[in-house]
Image: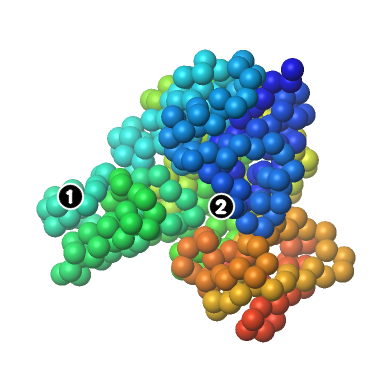
């Protein structure tokens, strides 16, 4: 009997790559998902190509165990999740079942307040809050030197629940409470992080930990349209001073040392201003989302399936194998949408198209304009930098409000 590697939920680009990587390792992939109907576009299509089980709540250990009772005992080799919000449950599930899994330290590192307490010298002021918190007192105490704060769910993705508040606004405490209560209702969130707002460029350090050692793949530089991420450049180390790049490395090495982490990928976000870099989201335990994982593979001339094979080997099979990261190629990924709300009828791909293209939405789905959050994406494109810039504007998006070219931000003049 071929043993299984269980993947709890999935992300936009990772589904087929991760499943084929599991097969290449000699195991059968098995996705545990809340519902196939929660997914759209190419992710939905790819999920249907591989075995999956639906579960009433993939955040509940009891519910996931109930779903797994339908498969033979001793048929699971390992459990992993490539989704940040499901890392703690993947860790716990592997321990309960006595199988291979993600490093136990990752369950703690999934908490933003814990990471901040580990490396205060690299972190903004932050504290966990809920609807009963006294925001006025916090502003006068912990955040007395801050002009602005952000409030977001402790566990979340896609900028959902992210909001900024000015502490000079006399109504800030009421507005923060209203935001928290709104997120509790709309997102099911219960715990939030209140964090000092940090100005600067948004970058992320991509890499992995094997045998307790950090292996850096490079820096990604992202640009947003308001709250929607729209473009990612990799590698982007050359756009920053050695002092900045070194500071990101020192911060992550400190996390690994102080947490005792031995294995796992990371996609750690920093804000860079001048010669300093401040960690705003550690994102340990998973490879980058959106199309950034494709970019890293393209940059180092790896088939994405082989790259995800390494992600899984390091993540849940305790592999100490390293990647050859010499001579990277400049790559871009673009996460595009529309400037207006519209219903998507069709995406027309031009002749000669050679880029990776992942549809995030189903045909006839309604999409909000770019700028609200990362749920404003229609599709993700990745490839070599020059080819992306040559081809991206050849796409046509047919909607109920007319035909559009992709709406995104590139901004090469700033680089």
Q: Above or below — where is 378 with respect to 279?
A: below
Q: Quadrant of residue 162?
A: bottom left
Q: Is residue 84 left or right of residue 344?
A: left
Q: Is 375 on the left-hand or right-hand side of 354?
A: left
In-image side of 85 versus 351 (left or right): left
For residue 203, above or below residue 179: above
Q: Position of residue 71 (x, y in %)?
A: 62, 25
* Quadrant housing residue 33: top right
Question: Please, what secondary structure does the residue beneath circle 1 have?
Answer: loop
Along the line of sight, the residue nearer the viewer: 134 or 209:
134
Give me the residue at 47% from left, 19% from top.
Answer: 95
Q: Earlier in the sequence, mark 2 or mark 1?
A: 2
Q: Are marks 2 and 1 in contact (CB under 8 Å)?
A: no
Whole-percent x, y for residue 404 in the image: 67, 79
Please tell me whether mark 2 sits on a helix, a strand or a loop: helix
- Determine the residue positioned at 57% across, 19% down: 100
Could you tell me which residue is drawn at 52 percent across and 61 percent down? 375
| Dot in front, 2 or 1 | 2
**Res. 299 in view:** no
Q: Is residue 305 visible?
A: yes
Rendered view: 134 above or below 257: below
Residues packed near mark 1 inside 10 Å, few (<14), some (14 to 19) or many (20 plus): few
**Residue at label 1?**
132
Q: Position of residue 273 (x, y in %)?
A: 42, 56
Looking at this view, is 25 or 276 the one in front? 25
Q: Is residue 79 left or right of residue 356?
A: left
Kindly identify the residue that appears in the image at 73 percent across and 58 percent down: 357
Real-space Cα separation, disc 2 to disc 1, in angstroms: 31 Å
The residue beneath circle 2 is 38
For this orientation, the residue located farthest to the right is 352
């Amino acid at each position: 009997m071929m043993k299984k590697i269980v993947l709890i939920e999935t992300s936009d680009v990772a589904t087929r790559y991760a499943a084929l990587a599991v097969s290449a390792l000699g195991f059968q992939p098995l996705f545990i998902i809340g519902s196939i109907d929660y997914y759209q576009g190419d992710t939905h299509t790819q999920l249907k190509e591989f075995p999956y089980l639906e579960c009433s709540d993939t955040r509940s250990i009891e519910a996931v165990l109930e779903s797994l009772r339908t498969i033979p005992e001793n048929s699971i080799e390992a459990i992993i999740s490539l989704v940040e919000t499901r890392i703690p449950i993947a860790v716990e599930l592997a321990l309960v079942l006595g199988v291979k899994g993600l490093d136990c330290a990752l369950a703690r590192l999934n908490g933003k307040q814990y990471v901040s307490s580990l490396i205060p010298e690299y972190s903004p002021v932050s504290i966990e809050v809920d609807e009963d918190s006294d925001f006025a007192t916090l502003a006068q105490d912990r955040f007395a030197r801050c002009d602005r704060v952000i409030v977001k769910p402790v566990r979340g993705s896609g900028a959902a629940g992210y909001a900024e508040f000015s502490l000079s606004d006399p109504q800030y405490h009421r507005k923060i409470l209203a935001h928290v209560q709104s997120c509790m209702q709309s997102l099911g969130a219960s715990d939030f992080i209140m964090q000092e707002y940090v100005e600067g460029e948004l970058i992320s350090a991509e890499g992995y930990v094997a045998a307790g050692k950090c292996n850096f793949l490079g820096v990604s530089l992202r640009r947003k349209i308001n709250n929607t991420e729209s473009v990612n450049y990799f590698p982007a180390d050359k756009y920053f001073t050695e002092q900045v790049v070194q500071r990101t490395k020192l911060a992550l090495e400190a996390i690994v040392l102080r947490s005792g982490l031995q294995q796992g990928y990371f996609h750690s976000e920093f804000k860079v201003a001048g010669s300093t870099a401040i960690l705003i989201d550690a994102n340990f335990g998973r490879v980058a989302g959106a199309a950034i994982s494709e970019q890293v593979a393209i940059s180092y001339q790896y088939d994405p399936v082989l790259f995800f094979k390494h992600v899984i080997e390091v993540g849940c099979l305790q592999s100490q194998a390293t990647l050859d990261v010499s001579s990277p190629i400049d790559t871009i990924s673009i996460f595009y949408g529309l400037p207006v709300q519209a219903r998507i009828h069709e995406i027309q791909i031009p002749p000669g198209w050679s880029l990776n293209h992942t549809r995030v939405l189903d045909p006839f789905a309604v999409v909000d304009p770019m700028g609200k959050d990362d749920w404003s994406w229609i599709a993700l494109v990745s490839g070599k930098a020059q080819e992306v810039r040559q081809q991206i504007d050849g796409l046509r998006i047919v909607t109920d409000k007319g035909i559009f070219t992709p709406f995104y931000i590139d901004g090469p003049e700033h680089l």
